[in-house]
Amino acid sequence: MAHSLKLAAVRITLGAQYFYIPAAQVQRCALVDDETPDIPRFSQWLGLPDEPEQGLHLHLWVPASMVDEGWHFWGELENVTLQAGDIFPLPELVQLCSTLPALRALVKDKSFSPLLSW
Protein backbone atom coordinates (compact mmCIF):
# COMPACT_ATOMS: atom_id res chain seq x y z
CA MET A 1 0.00 0.00 0.00
CA ALA A 2 1.53 3.30 -1.08
CA HIS A 3 1.35 6.29 1.23
CA SER A 4 1.81 9.78 -0.07
CA LEU A 5 3.37 12.38 2.15
CA LYS A 6 1.21 15.37 2.97
CA LEU A 7 1.82 18.66 4.77
CA ALA A 8 -0.90 20.41 6.75
CA ALA A 9 -0.40 24.10 6.04
CA VAL A 10 -2.11 27.45 6.21
CA ARG A 11 -2.48 29.47 3.03
CA ILE A 12 -2.36 33.22 3.50
CA THR A 13 -3.84 35.29 0.72
CA LEU A 14 -2.51 38.85 0.42
CA GLY A 15 -4.17 40.48 -2.56
CA ALA A 16 -3.37 38.14 -5.47
CA GLN A 17 -0.37 36.48 -3.75
CA TYR A 18 -0.39 33.25 -1.72
CA PHE A 19 2.02 32.32 1.07
CA TYR A 20 2.11 28.96 2.85
CA ILE A 21 3.28 28.14 6.39
CA PRO A 22 3.26 24.65 7.95
CA ALA A 23 0.18 24.51 10.20
CA ALA A 24 2.23 23.09 13.08
CA GLN A 25 4.16 26.39 13.25
CA VAL A 26 1.07 28.62 13.50
CA GLN A 27 0.04 29.19 17.11
CA ARG A 28 -3.15 31.10 16.34
CA CYS A 29 -4.88 33.61 14.12
CA ALA A 30 -7.55 36.05 15.28
CA LEU A 31 -9.52 38.97 13.94
CA VAL A 32 -7.92 42.32 14.72
CA ASP A 33 -10.23 44.08 17.15
CA ASP A 34 -8.25 47.30 17.73
CA GLU A 35 -5.62 49.37 16.00
CA THR A 36 -2.27 47.64 15.47
CA PRO A 37 0.43 50.26 16.15
CA ASP A 38 2.95 47.85 17.73
CA ILE A 39 2.27 44.86 15.51
CA PRO A 40 4.27 44.64 12.27
CA ARG A 41 2.44 44.21 9.01
CA PHE A 42 3.19 40.82 7.42
CA SER A 43 3.80 42.33 3.97
CA GLN A 44 6.33 44.82 5.37
CA TRP A 45 8.13 42.08 7.29
CA LEU A 46 8.37 40.16 4.00
CA GLY A 47 9.77 43.27 2.30
CA LEU A 48 6.76 43.59 -0.02
CA PRO A 49 4.32 46.42 -0.76
CA ASP A 50 1.28 46.52 1.50
CA GLU A 51 -1.63 44.38 0.40
CA PRO A 52 -5.00 46.03 -0.33
CA GLU A 53 -7.23 46.43 2.71
CA GLN A 54 -9.78 43.87 1.61
CA GLY A 55 -10.88 40.62 3.14
CA LEU A 56 -10.41 40.09 6.86
CA HIS A 57 -8.05 42.07 9.10
CA LEU A 58 -6.15 39.25 10.84
CA HIS A 59 -3.49 38.92 13.53
CA LEU A 60 -1.22 35.88 13.07
CA TRP A 61 1.19 34.37 15.62
CA VAL A 62 4.04 32.07 14.52
CA PRO A 63 6.32 31.63 17.56
CA ALA A 64 9.17 30.01 15.61
CA SER A 65 9.54 33.23 13.57
CA MET A 66 10.80 35.02 16.70
CA VAL A 67 8.34 37.86 15.97
CA ASP A 68 6.80 37.78 19.45
CA GLU A 69 3.89 40.12 18.74
CA GLY A 70 3.04 38.37 15.46
CA TRP A 71 1.88 40.17 12.33
CA HIS A 72 -1.28 41.74 11.06
CA PHE A 73 -2.52 41.60 7.48
CA TRP A 74 -5.59 42.08 5.31
CA GLY A 75 -6.64 38.98 3.44
CA GLU A 76 -7.61 35.41 4.12
CA LEU A 77 -6.15 32.46 5.96
CA GLU A 78 -7.28 28.92 5.31
CA ASN A 79 -6.17 25.43 6.26
CA VAL A 80 -4.97 23.33 3.34
CA THR A 81 -3.25 20.00 2.79
CA LEU A 82 -0.30 20.03 0.43
CA GLN A 83 0.65 16.84 -1.39
CA ALA A 84 4.33 16.00 -1.75
CA GLY A 85 4.06 16.67 -5.50
CA ASP A 86 2.87 20.23 -4.80
CA ILE A 87 6.12 21.22 -3.01
CA PHE A 88 9.29 21.99 -4.95
CA PRO A 89 12.81 22.75 -3.70
CA LEU A 90 14.07 26.25 -4.37
CA PRO A 91 16.13 26.64 -7.53
CA GLU A 92 19.71 27.59 -6.69
CA LEU A 93 19.34 31.05 -8.24
CA VAL A 94 16.29 31.76 -6.08
CA GLN A 95 18.18 30.61 -2.98
CA LEU A 96 21.00 33.01 -3.79
CA CYS A 97 18.87 36.03 -4.71
CA SER A 98 15.71 35.86 -2.62
CA THR A 99 15.22 38.37 0.18
CA LEU A 100 12.01 36.74 1.48
CA PRO A 101 12.63 35.69 5.09
CA ALA A 102 12.07 32.02 5.92
CA LEU A 103 11.63 30.98 2.27
CA ARG A 104 12.22 27.23 2.16
CA ALA A 105 10.37 25.89 -0.90
CA LEU A 106 7.80 26.70 -3.57
CA VAL A 107 4.24 25.42 -3.73
CA LYS A 108 2.64 24.77 -7.12
CA ASP A 109 -0.85 26.27 -7.03
CA LYS A 110 -2.11 28.75 -9.64
CA SER A 111 1.56 29.62 -10.16
CA PHE A 112 4.41 29.02 -7.71
CA SER A 113 3.99 30.45 -4.22
CA PRO A 114 6.45 30.69 -1.30
CA LEU A 115 6.47 28.11 1.47
CA LEU A 116 7.81 29.83 4.58
CA SER A 117 9.17 27.76 7.44
CA TRP A 118 11.34 28.33 10.50
Image (cartoon, helix red, strand yellow):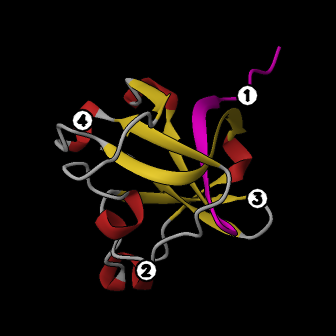
Q: Residues within 10 Å of mark 4 (few under 14, many from 20)?
A: few
Give whichever of 94, 34 is nearer the camera: 34
Specify the amino acid type for callout 1.
Ser
Instruction: Give the Cα distance between marks 2 and 4.
Output: 23 Å
- The numbered dot on residue 4 is 1
Please tell me which of labels 3 and 4 falls first in the chain.
4
Which residue lies at the image location 70% right of the left edge and 69% below the top edge?
A: 16
Helix, strand, or loop for circle 3?
A: loop
Task: Tell me which numbered mark, 4 or 1, is placed earlier along the sequence.
Answer: 1
Q: Secondary structure at mark 4?
A: helix
Residue under numbered circle 4 = 64
Mark number displayed over residue 94: 2
Q: Which of the 4 image quarters holds residue 62? A: top left
Q: Earlier in the sequence, mark 2 or mark 1?
A: 1
> Which one is closest to the eye, mark 2 or mark 3?
3
Specify the amino acid type for callout 3: Asp
Residue range in magenta is 1-17
Asked whether disc 2 touches disc 3, contact meaning CB atoms under 8 Å apart, the reply is no
Give me the residue at 65% from left, 29% from top: 5
Which dot, 4 or 1, sits closer to the camera?
4
